[in-house]
Amino acid sequence: RALPAAQLAGACVSGHIALPFLPALLRGASLISSRALFAAEEKLGAPLTVKEPTPIATLMSKPVRYVGRVVQVKGKVSAVCQKAGCWMTLADSDSGAAVRIKVNDGEIVFPKEAAGKTAVAEGTFTEVRLTHEQAVAQARHEAEEKGRPFDPASVKGPVTYYQVKATGAIILE
């Protein structure tokens, strides 16, 4: 037997129907929508302050011009450090240009599952110069991280590369 709406919801003397469960229902809907909103982006480190990102292709085509400057870049996460989350590589889907985003261990931890997502990162663009010995040590370390075999003879001469020493990032999707 179906109950009349007045008995289900409770009618007040004036005949208006009270819905005691409505506030809880709305709070639940609000909680669900706010969780969905926050799940769409993950903010890491300091808030971003640069207004517009510099295209990765522009940055990497003339890197010396940007060394020492605070930059913001946006791209697809193509790789993430699987040991400590201390670096990620962002790639521009149009040009294929890529840049490493690096932090000191523990300052920011890039999510290991961020690969394939879009991210925005901000920090100081730096030049890193490695001697041959340093380059071999770094290549060995990266091979270990990725579980790949390493041949020291594969590293030729001293190496110079550029990266963003990040202060903040947002993983978007």
Image (cartoon, rainbow, N blue to C red):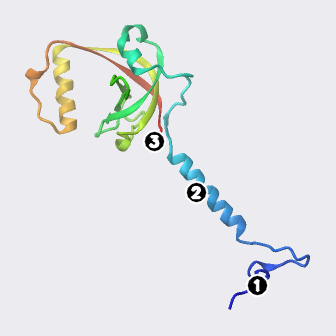
**Considering only vertical position in the picture, is 68 above or below 82?**
above
Amino acid on which the number 2 mark rests in the picture: Ile
Q: Say few, some or many: other residues with alpha carbon within 10 Å of mark 1 (under 14 / 14 to 19 / 20 or more).
A: few
* Mark carried by residue 32: 2
Element class at badge 2: helix
Q: Which residue is mark 3?
A: 173
User: What is the CA distance from the residue labelled 3 to the residue labelled 1?
Assistant: 47 Å
**Considering only vertical position in the picture, is 14 above or below 173?**
below
Taking the spot 39% from the left edge, 38% from the top edge, the residue there is 109
Taking the spot 11% from the left edge, 34% from the top edge, the residue there is 149
Q: Is 66 displayed left or right of 144 in the figure? A: right
Element class at badge 1: loop
Q: Which residue is mark 1?
A: 4
Where on the picture, by quarter, is residue 83?
A: top left
Q: Nearer the viewer, residue 108 or 172?
A: 172
Q: Please provide percent x and percent y for residue 159.
A: 22, 14
Mark 3 or 1: the one toward you: 1
Mark 2 or 1: the one toward you: 1
Q: Which of the two discs, 2 and 1, labels the residue nearer the N terminus?
A: 1
Element class at badge 3: loop
Where on the picture, by quarter, is residue 140?
A: top left
Q: Which of the two discs, 3 and 2, labels the residue nearer the N terminus?
A: 2
Q: Nearer the viewer, residue 83 or 71?
A: 71
Taking the spot 8% from the left edge, 21% from the top edge, the residue there is 153
User: What is the CA distance from the residue labelled 2 to the residue labelled 1?
Assistant: 31 Å
Report if the CB atoms under discs 2 and 1 are less than 8 Å apart. Answer: no
Q: Say few, some or many: other residues with alpha carbon within 10 Å of mark 3 (under 14 / 14 to 19 / 20 or more).
A: few
